[in-house]
């Protein structure tokens, strides 16, 4: 286990803000997790699982905690005829996994191309994009439980997956994900349900895996800030989920607004549509933080932006949303205080 002290969070997160984290523990193997747990108790600091830092906002004052990450990045594929079973270390890059699956002719996660972060973090957030979700292909998740020191396996149904959530998010920092197993298909099944993909290929076309991956990456590049130039964590807010009866007033106020029924129940309100068409947020800024012109759900940070800039902008957006629609919104990004 490698132990580093006072590591700048601006180097660990894609938002590139914040002071330092007190300890960063880097493990080569999941077998070192009990040692990491003992270390955090000795130092009397919370132990926080850390992936790629692509979905968190760190305070300028720093974080008095021990971040623990797994450096193992092995991806193993087992051909089972009509399907391929992928066993993936939590530290592996999610997009490297997608790229490999596409190359090997495995269908199911190509619409999730271009999403930054680790494979383990994908399970926490139940990442989703362009009509697909991580949980669609997940078989099981392997974890270390910091509460009782045991290794466990959660089958898909036990993970409590929902829109951008899971048991690993609900019981934050209790479980350290050590690996995931996905079952992908050999049978071509293009998922073109998302509007931009439908417009790109047409409903009746049968694009290849590589064509879909290339299209998704191209769409993402047009909507999200380049990480080489700006700090960001992608979509900053969660789309609100409401009950069917709660949508009636919204439909009367905004008859053109699309609504999306979720399989687990409830209706998803398209926050990007409201931000763009009702609140007119694009270009709004606070200090060196601003709403991205190509996608109003995204908050971007210029070089030198502070945590306070981002928080002030987010609060301004939440207030305007509540005043205009009556809806309270919550961040998708994990915000440390």
Image (tube, helix red, strand yellow):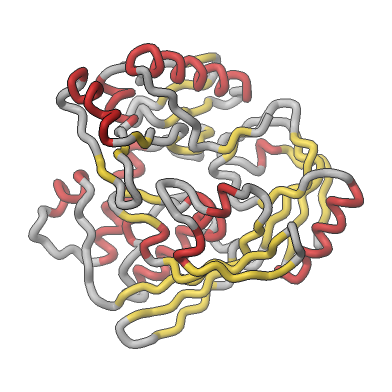
Q: Quadrant of residue 59?
A: top right
Instruction: Name the residue located 66 percent from the left edge and 59 percent from the top edge.
Output: 176
Q: Position of residue 277 (x, y in %)?
A: 25, 21
- The relative height of residue 221 versus residue 72 in the rendered view (above or below) is above
Q: Position of residue 66 (x, y in %)?
A: 78, 47
Q: Nearer the viewer, residue 196 or 227?
A: 196
Quadrant in which the N terminus appears? bottom right
Q: Position of residue 95 (x, y in %)?
A: 45, 58
Q: Residue reaching furthest front?
A: 245
Quadrant in which the C terminus appears? top right
Instruction: Name the residue located 38 percent from the left edge and 50 percent from the top edge.
Output: 128
Q: Residue reaching furthest bottom?
A: 81
Q: Nearer the viewer, residue 24 or 140?
A: 140
Q: Nearer the viewer, residue 166 or 52?
A: 166
Instruction: Name the residue located 36 percent from the left edge and 27 percent from the top edge.
Output: 296
- The relative height of residue 130 versus residue 233 in the rendered view (above or below) is below
Circle count: 0
- The relative height of residue 26 versus residue 106 in the rendered view (above or below) is above
227 sits left or right of 178 in the view = left
């Amino acid at each position: 286990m490698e132990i580093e002290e006072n590591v700048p969070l601006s180097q660990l997160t894609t938002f590139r803000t914040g002071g330092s984290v007190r300890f960063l523990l880097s493990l080569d193997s999941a077998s070192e997790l009990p040692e990491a747990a003992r270390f955090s108790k000795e130092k009397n600091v919370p132990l926080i699982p850390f992936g790629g830092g692509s979905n968190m906002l760190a305070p300028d004052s720093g974080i008095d905690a021990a971040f623990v990450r797994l450096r193992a990045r092995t991806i193993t594929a087992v051909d089972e005829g009509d399907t391929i079973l992928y066993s993936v270390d939590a530290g592996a890059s999610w997009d490297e996994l997608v790229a490999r699956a596409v190359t090997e002719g495995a269908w199911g996660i190509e619409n999730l191309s271009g999403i930054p972060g680790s494979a383990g973090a994908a399970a926490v957030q139940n990442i989703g994009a362009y009509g697909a979700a991580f949980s669609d292909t997940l078989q099981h998740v392997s974890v270390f439980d910091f509460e009782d020191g045991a290794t466990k396996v959660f089958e898909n149904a036990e993970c409590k997956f929902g829109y951008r959530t899971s048991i690993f998010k609900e019981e934050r920092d209790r479980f350290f994900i050590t690996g995931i197993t996905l079952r992908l298909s050999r049978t071509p099944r293009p998922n073109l349900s998302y509007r931009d993909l439908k417009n790109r290929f047409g409903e009746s076309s049968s694009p290849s895996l590589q064509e879909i991956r290339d299209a998704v990456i191209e769409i993402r590049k047009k909507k999200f800030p380049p990480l080489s130039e700006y700090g960001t964590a992608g979509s900053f807010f969660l789309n609100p989920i409401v009950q069917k009866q709660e949508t009636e007033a919204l439909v009367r106020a905004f008859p053109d607004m699309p609504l999306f029924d979720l399989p687990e129940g409830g209706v998803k309100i398209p926050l990007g549509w409201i931000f763009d068409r009702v609140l007119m947020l694009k270009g709004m800024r606070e200090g060196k933080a601003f709403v991205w012109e190509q996608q109003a759900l995204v908050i971007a940070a210029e070089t030198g932006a502070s945590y306070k800039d981002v928080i002030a902008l987010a609060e301004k957006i939440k207030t305007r949303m509540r005043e205009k629609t009556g809806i309270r919104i919550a961040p998708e990004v994990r915000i440390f205080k």
